[in-house]
Amino acid sequence: MKVVSTSPSFAKYSNEPIDLLTKNGIELIQLPADISEDQFLDHIQDAAGAIVAFNHINQHVLSKAPHLKIICKHGIGVDNIDLKATNEQDVWVTNVPDANKHAVADFTFALMLSLARQVPLAHQQTKEGNWPRIFGSDIHNQTIGIVGLGSIGREVAHRAKGFSMEILAYDPYPNYDFANANGIKFVELDELLRNSDFVTLHMPLTKQTKNLIDSEQLEIMKESAYLINASRGEIVVEKSLYKALKSNTIAGAALDVFEKEPAQEHPLFDLPNFIATPHIAGYTIGAINSLGMVCAQNIVDVIINKKRPQHVVNKL
């Protein structure tokens, strides 16, 4: 049995996921993350499973993979996988919704603190031999607006409570039990944007959330507010964000995700009130190993044990 992986972080820090596959007679072929579709087709045509990061799995790819039984997203978002086509070909699609929730929530606060206290600027100027007096913004006792109160959004809320923040949330499918137990107020998106000092995005990329934050939404926000996106790049219209930051419509923004990745050149990079990181919010050793083990176990369950896998996201 053969499985291919295009995730650069699969089994990066531990051999446990590979050992689990090998023990069950499954051969793993690790491929580069930026592999072309044609090259990917050469390897997927006789594979029983695939572990993917960001390469696209579309109907054409699936038509060339007659033995494929399962696609495991090495992460959460499955916007790069054609779920309708996988249903038509009876291929399981799974993700790992909880393995990196703590890592992403921690990183969200790292970005919030970096924005509020201008840590990158202080770091750069101090290393250049300066000793600047940089005044930042408070986080303690401020209002945070969490757009998407799923597994990651809930962890962000737990951390916000530690900073004694007022917590607003917007979610199309509100979890009132969690909100009531944690002092969170659900509001409409416009109200959240209007009243939050920090707005952090934790929504999946769907037709409904694509371009969710555009110029109209940015203009609603406070001039002193900050925007953080560690979910999916296409949720924010980057041209509109650039204009908002350039004109000081909002105080600052931090993106860990971009409309096109890798984002090696970007107008946003020239702005002093903007922080960029290379889609690493979920990258901790513990989180990556957990992701790998869940993917490996799902493959074993489907291919060897003939069982339904965990965290199925299509309709099989």
Image: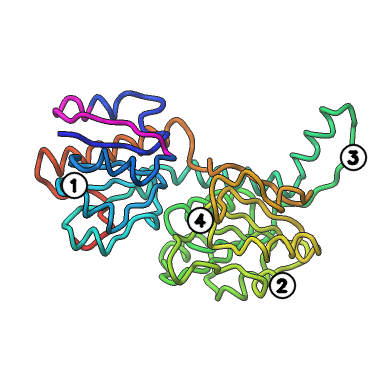
Magenta residue span: 20-33
Please state if 251 lies on the left or on the right of 103 as rendered.
right
The residue lying toward the viewer, choosing from 48 and 121, is: 48
Q: Nearer the viewer, residue 51 or 225?
A: 51
Q: Amino acid at mark 1?
A: Leu
On screen, residue 206 versus residue 135, left or right, reads left
- Nearer the observer: mark 3 or 4; the answer is 4
Residue 133 badge: 3
Q: Is residue 257 left or right of residue 128?
A: left
Foreground residue among 147 and 17: 17
- What x and y, as percent, mark residue 109? 61, 46
Residue 219 is marked as 2
- Quadrant containing the C terminus is bottom left
Q: CA distance from mark 2 to mark 4?
A: 21 Å
Question: Which mark, residue 37?
Answer: none
Look at 41% across and 70% down and name the residue there: 173
